[in-house]
Image (spheres, rainbow, N blue to C red):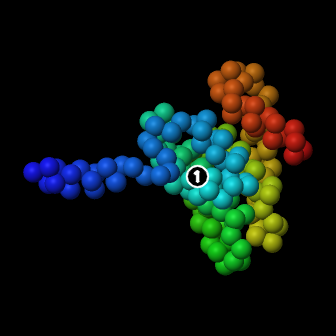
Amino acid sequence: MLQRIALFFLPVVLLFAEPGFCQSQDLLAIRELYYRSVKEEEAAKKLCVVATGEQVPASIIAGYKAVGKIMMCNHVGNPYTKLKYFYAGRDALEKSISAAPANVELRYLRYAVQRNTPSLLHYNGSIQADRQLIEKYLAEERNKDADTDLYERIRKYMVTYK
């Protein structure tokens, strides 16, 4: 009897014991993972499989997953694999932005990616529009209080990469 119970629960436990993220992962941890993914392959892998949280909109999760795929380009050597990750991430990021075009966080992610993408990949068509939206966001004082973490991350990036 005990063996049957154990055999019944083992697949259930293994199914929900994913080594990546759990359902309750919050946005601050996801943002931190994004910053670490530039240099850490493991962080980029985790970002690719981040789970939807209760407090995080699905479009933002999809955007971070897309950027995770793009960040994997930093951690693979094969040029074909780099392109595969890049195009998959680019398409997913554009899809996320088309679902929520006014979302400044998604536009910030795209802006950061496009500024750092080699020009031969021709992924730089939205830099000016994204920059304008981001600068408008930073100019409004109420945004500073609404999401301090996002505001400060964007502000620091824009100051550093002007």
* Local crowd size for mark 1, using a 10 Å CA cut-off: few (<14), some (14–19), many (≥20): many
* Amino acid type at image mark 1: Leu
Element under disc 1:
helix
Quarter-wise, where is residue 48 in the image?
A: bottom right
Locate the C terminus by quadrant. top right
Residue drawn at (83%, 40%), measured in percent from left and top? 158
| Left or right relative to 1: residue 118 | right
| Left or right relative to 64: residue 142 | right
Residue matched to label 1:
47
Percent across and percent down for residue 38 are 73, 54
| Left or right relative to 155: residue 40 | left
Residue lying at the far right in this picture: please name it: 162
Relative to 119, is 143 above or below?
above
| Left or right relative to 2: residue 45 | right
Viewer can see residue 8:
no
Along the line of sight, the residue nearer the viewer: 55 or 78:
78
Quarter-wise, where is residue 15 in the image?
A: bottom left
Residue drawn at (65%, 27%), measured in percent from left and top? 147
Residue drawn at (82%, 67%), measured in percent from left and top? 119
Residue lying at the far front in this picture: please name it: 2
Percent across and percent down for residue 109 are 69, 48
Percent across and percent down for residue 82 are 68, 71
Residue lying at the far left in this picture: please name it: 1
Q: How many marks?
A: 1
Along the line of sight, the residue nearer the viewer: 5 or 80:
5
Along the line of sight, the residue nearer the viewer: 19 or 137:
19
Residue drawn at (51%, 54%), measured in percent from left and top? 49
Percent across and percent down for residue 88 are 59, 66
Viewer can see residue 119:
yes
